[in-house]
Image (spheres, grey):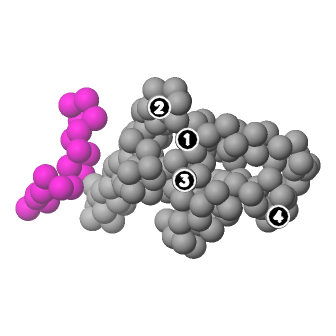
Amino acid sequence: MPEIAYPSQISSWGTIPINLGDIAAQQIKARVLDTQQRIEDLAEEAWLSVKTKIDDILILTQAEGDAAGKDDPEFERLVEEWQAQRSKSSSFAGRDAILPAYQRIIGMGPKALPLILRALAKQNDNWYWALKAISGEDPVSPEDRGKTRVMREAWLRWGRAKGYVR
C-alpha cells in the first residue's frame, strides 16, 4: 500500500513532490516562525526609530517656534558656562552634575524643565540628573539606565505627557 503524504509533509520544488518526515517539517516550521519573528522585531525597531525621529523633528519645530521670547537668557548663559566647565574626556555624568553652572540650572527649578527638554531634543547630553532632581520623577526603567538614546526618548515622552514639550 502506498504511503499517504499529508499536506504538512509535502512541499514542492518545481513539479517534484518531496515527502518530508515529521521532524524535518517541524524544523522548517520552526525556522519559518523564527524568521517571521525576526522580521516583526526588525519592523518594530525600525518603526520606533522612525517615530523617534519624527518626534524629534516635531519637538525641534515647536522649540524653534517657541524660541521667540520664551527662552531664558540665564539658562542659555548657564548652559554655555556648564559646557565650558565640563571635561569632554569624562563620560561620567556625575562629574558634570556637580559643576556650579549645572547646579544653578537645577536651582532654577521647574521653570528649567521645558528649557532642558528642548536642549535634550536638540542634542543628547547629560541632562538626566537635573531632570530627575527637578521633577522628582524618573521615567527611565532600571534596565535602560546608561543607554542614553533610550533614556533621552523616555524623558522626551515624559515631557510630552506632562505638557512641557509638544
Residue stretch rendered in magenta on the structure: 1-19
Asked whether the beta carbons under mark 1 and mark 3 sit within 8 Å of each other, the answer is no
Q: Earlier in the sequence, mark 4 or mark 2?
A: 2
Asked whether the beta carbons under mark 2 and mark 3 sit within 8 Å of each other, the answer is no
Q: Secondary structure at mark 3?
A: helix
Instruction: Name the residue tied to disc 1.
Output: 118
* C-alpha separation, residue under disc 2 versus residue under disc 3: 14 Å
Q: Is residue 26 above or below residue 19?
A: below
* Residue kind at label 4, given as amino acid type: Ile
Q: Dot 3, crowdedness within 10 Å: few (<14), some or many (≥20)?
A: some
Asked whether the beta carbons under mark 4 and mark 3 sit within 8 Å of each other, the answer is no
Instruction: Name the residue tied to disc 3.
Output: 111
- The C terminus sits in image quarter: top left
Instruction: Name the residue tied to disc 2.
Output: 66
Q: Residue at x 76, y 61 (%)?
A: 103
Q: Earlier in the sequence, mark 1 or mark 3?
A: 3
* C-alpha separation, residue under disc 4 versus residue under disc 3: 20 Å
Q: Residue at x 57, y 45 (%)?
A: 115
* C-alpha separation, residue under disc 1 versus residue under disc 4: 22 Å
Q: Which of the 4 quarters of the picture holds residue 28?
A: bottom left
> Can the viewer see residue 33?
yes
Asked whether the beta carbons under mark 2 and mark 1 sit within 8 Å of each other, the answer is yes
Q: State the mark number for residue 98.
A: 4
> Can the viewer see residue 146?
no
Q: Dot 2, crowdedness within 10 Å: few (<14), some or many (≥20)?
A: few
